[in-house]
Image (cartoon, rainbow, N blue to C red):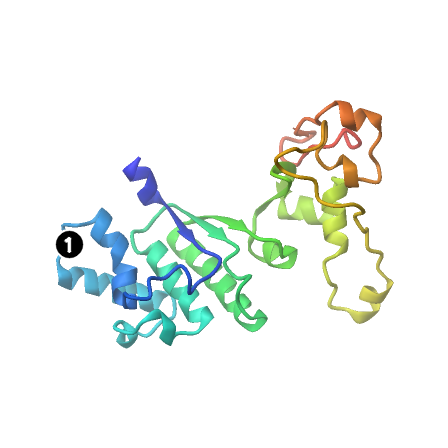
Amino acid sequence: MEETRKDIQMIFQDPLASLNPRMNIGEIIAEPLKIYQPHLSAAEVKEKVQAMMLKVGLLPNLINRYPHEFSGGQCQRIGIARALIIEPKMIICDEPVSALDVSIQAQVVNLLKSLQKEMGLSLIFIAHDLAVVKHISDRVLVMYLGNAMELGSDVEVYNNTKHPYTKALMSAVPIPDPKLERNKSIELLEGDLPSPINPPSGCVFRTRCLKADENCAKQKPPFTSQNNSHFVACLKVL
C-alpha cells in the first residue's frame, strides 16, 4: 500500500488551504521525500527541492518563504512541486484551477501539460470547466450524480456527443465568436438535482432528461460501446 501511495499523488482545489502555514515552502515540498526517501541527506533533499522549484517556475531563492507570501497561482505551483517531488506515476488533480483567476488558469494548465509530457505522468483531471478539460485531456469521462454517463476520446466526446446530459453541458460552453454565441441554442435542464443518497430508479438522469420515458425509470442503462472506445449509458442511444 505504501508503494502505491508513493506512485499516486494529488493536487488540491484550494492551493493556499492545502499548504501548512507553519512550514516554509522548502519544508512543504520536501515532506514527501522525508516520508518515502528518508535515506537522503539534508543537502540532497535541498538540491532536489530547488530543482523541482525551478521545474514548476519558482525561484530557488524563495525556498524559506511561507505560503501566505505567495499568490494563488504560485501556491498551486508549490502544490504541484510537492506532488511531483517523489516522481509519481499518476497525479489526481482535483479542480486545480477553479480557485484561480482566469489569467492564471492557463499558465497552470499549460504547466501540467508540459510536466506530464516531460515526466511521463498520467493525470486524472477533475473539473467542471469543459473548455479546460478539452485543452488538457486525451480521454474524457462525464459523470452525473456519481454515475458515468459518457466516456471517450476528447474528439469523440466533444465532436460526436451522444448522451443527453453531455449535450446539455456542451451547449453551455461559451463560444469565442460573438455571432456564433448569440445564435447557438442552449439545452436547459429542468428540475432540481436529485439527492445522491436517494437517487431516482433506473437512469439517474431521467428526472431531468427531455428524452426520458417509462423504460428509463425501470432499467438502469448499461455502459456500452459500439466501437470499444466511445461508451454511453443511455437507453436512447443504444
At horizontal 45% and vertical 55% (from top left) the residue drawn is 12
Q: Is residue 84 visible in this depiction of the protein? A: yes
In the image, residue 166 above or below residue 65: above
Q: Secondary structure at mark 1?
A: loop
In depth, the one of 190 and 124 nearer the eye is 190
In depth, the one of 71 and 226 nearer the eye is 71
Q: Position of residue 186 (x, y in %)?
A: 82, 55
134 to the left or right of 200: left
Q: Quadrant of the C terminus?
A: top right
In depth, the one of 47 and 95 nearer the eye is 95
Q: Quadrant of residue 143?
A: top right
| Amino acid on which the number 1 mark rests in the picture | Leu
Q: Residue furthest top?
A: 218
In the image, residue 32 above or below residue 68: above
Q: Position of residue 74 (x, y in %)?
A: 42, 70
| Mark 1 crowdedness (10 Å alpha carbons): few <14, some 14-19, many ≥20 | few
98 to the left or right of 64: right
At horizontal 80% and vertical 70% (from top left) the residue drawn is 178
In depth, the one of 164 and 215 nearer the eye is 215
29 to the left or right of 93: left
29 to the left or right of 224: left
Residue placed under numbered mark 1 in the picture: 40
Q: Quadrant of the N terminus?
A: top left
- Give the number of callouts: 1
In the image, residue 197 above or below residue 83: above
At horizontal 33% and vertical 66% (from top left) the residue drawn is 21
Q: Quadrant of residue 200?
A: top right
Q: Position of residue 9 (x, y in %)?
A: 38, 48
Q: Position of residue 149 (x, y in %)?
A: 67, 37
Q: Residue furthest right?
A: 183
Q: Is residue 161 visible in this depiction of the protein? A: no
